Structure formats: structure tokens, C-alpha cells
């Protein structure tokens, strides 16, 4: 961190207490305190949308990311809106194809949801974007929707979307993103053409 970043964070109305608490929440540490001043700061963070029910929100993560990254970044709200809009578009396409916003599939006797909730979708997607340096969000959305269309066509809803995004530090989504063309070749996960 440098002084310029600290000044910009303070200009936005955030102080170092907020940043420290955000790091604690991100590490899943409790921020419940017997100190009224700390509780007031936590309440203000919830009001500003930085944390929700003891978990860091996208806006909160963007504040932390701003401190960690160098150079200019997109405003927190704009960047968060891109991920939220993508999630809504994915759910909308799922509903168009299946008539439902969610598909449930049975794996080894247990039933799982194909699509994760919004928080998990965005968190996992951000991890892939950052790890693999994926920058074209429209292309990324098209790849995700293409995967949903393939699953629908085959009526096979595995791997689940979270595993398609990244599992064991490997991302089929990132591979498909890199191989994407206007009309991608549809391949099954074993590499054979569909």
C-alpha cells in the first residue's frame, strides 16, 4: 500500500478501521464485539453494503482489491454490477431453456443444484477471472451460457457450474474461454466432440 491509495480510500469515506474489519470478515473471523464503537463501525459497513450477515460483499471485496492492486481500477460498483448482471443473464437463459431458474441433478445418490447462488457464482467467477487473467466479460458470459446450452441439449447437468468454473485449481471454463471462437466446437469433458 502507498500513501496515494490510502488518501483515495479515505476520500471515499473508508478509514483503516473499516479496511481492517473487512480483512477480518474475509478471513471469516467474527466482528461481534463488546466495544460499542466497533459495533457502530460494523453497523455502518452493513449499511454501506460492504458486509452482509457476517460475510464480505462484492463491494467490500472491491475495497480490499483496490488496496492490493496497482494502478487504476474500475469503480467498485461498476465492476460488481458486471458480475451481477452476468449472473442474472445466466439464470435468465437457464429459465428460457428449462422453464426453471435452477436444475437439480443427482450425483451418487445426493441431489445438487446445478447453478450456485449469486454470491458463490460471483465469488468463484472472480477467482477464475483473476487467476487466469480473463478480461472479456461478454466472451466469458457467452462461454458460460454455451456450457448451459450443452448441458441442456444432453440433459446432463454435470459437472455442476461451480466445478465447471474451477475445481482443484483447474478451470474448464478458462480453457473454453481461451478456445472460444464465434462458433465453438462443442466437446464433452472427456474431449470427444458432441
Image (spheres, grey):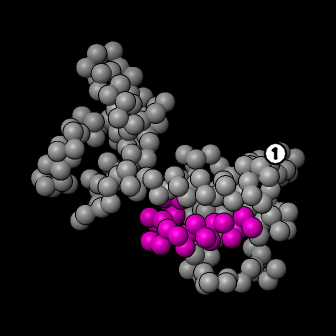
Q: Secondary structure at mark 1?
A: strand
Residue at figure coordinates x 35%, y 25% from the top left:
43
Q: Total number of numbered labels?
A: 1
Q: Position of residue 124 (x, y in %)?
A: 55, 55
Name the chief secondary structure element in magenta: helix
- Quadrant location of residue 183? bottom right
Q: Is the residue 22 above or below the residue 123 in the image? A: above
Q: Position of residue 67 (x, y in %)?
A: 26, 53
Q: Nearer the viewer, residue 85 or 42?
A: 85
| Residue at the spot of label 1 | 111
Task: Say if the magenta span includes residue 147.
Answer: yes
Magenta residues? Answer: 123-149
Image position of 35 (left or right of 170)? left
Residue 74 visible from this viewpoint: yes
Q: Residues within 10 Å of mark 1 (few under 14, many from 20)?
A: few
Image position of 79 (left or right of 160)? left
Residue 24 visible from this viewpoint: no
Q: Is the residue 154 above or below the residue 184 in the image? A: above
Q: Position of residue 56 (x, y in %)?
A: 43, 40
- Quadrant location of residue 156? bottom right
Q: Position of residue 32 (x, y in %)?
A: 39, 22
Residue at figure coordinates x 23%, y 39% from the top left:
14
Quadrant placement of the N terminus: bottom left
Residue at figure coordinates x 64%, y 58% from the top left:
90
Q: Nearer the viewer, residue 194 or 97?
A: 97
Residue at figure coordinates x 62%, y 71% from the top left:
143
Q: Is the residue 3 above or below the residue 128 in the image? A: above
Quadrant placement of the C terminus: bottom right
Image position of 188 (left or right of 20)? right
Amino acid at each position: 500500500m502507498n500513501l496515494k491509495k490510502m488518501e483515495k480510500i479515505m476520500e471515499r469515506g473508508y478509514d483503516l478501521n473499516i479496511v481492517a474489519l473487512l480483512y477480518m470478515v474475509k478471513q471469516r473471523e467474527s466482528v461481534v464485539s463488546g466495544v460499542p464503537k466497533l459495533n457502530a463501525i460494523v453497523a455502518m459497513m452493513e449499511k454501506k453494503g460492504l458486509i452482509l450477515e457476517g460475510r464480505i460483499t462484492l463491494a467490500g471485496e472491491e475495497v480490499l482489491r483496490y488496496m492490493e492492486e496497482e494502478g487504476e481500477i474500475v469503480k467498485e460498483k461498476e465492476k460488481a454490477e458486471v458480475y451481477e448482471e452476468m449472473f442474472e443473464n445466466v439464470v435468465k437463459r437457464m429459465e428460457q431453456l428449462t422453464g426453471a431458474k435452477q436444475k437439480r441433478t443427482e450425483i451418487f445418490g445426493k441431489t445438487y443444484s446445478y447453478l450456485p447462488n449469486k454470491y458463490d457464482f460471483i465469488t468463484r467467477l472472480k477467482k477464475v477471472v483473476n487467476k487466469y487473467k480473463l478480461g472479456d466479460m461478454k466472451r466469458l458470459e457467452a462461454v458460460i451460457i454455451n456450457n448451459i446450452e450443452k448441458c441442456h441439449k444432453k440433459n446432463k447437468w454435470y459437472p455442476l457450474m461451480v466445478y465447471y468454473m474451477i475445481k482443484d485449481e483447474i478451470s474448464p471454463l478458462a480453457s473454453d474461454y481461451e478456445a472460444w471462437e464465434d462458433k465453438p466446437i462443442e466437446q464433452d469433458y472427456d474431449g470427444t466432440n458432441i
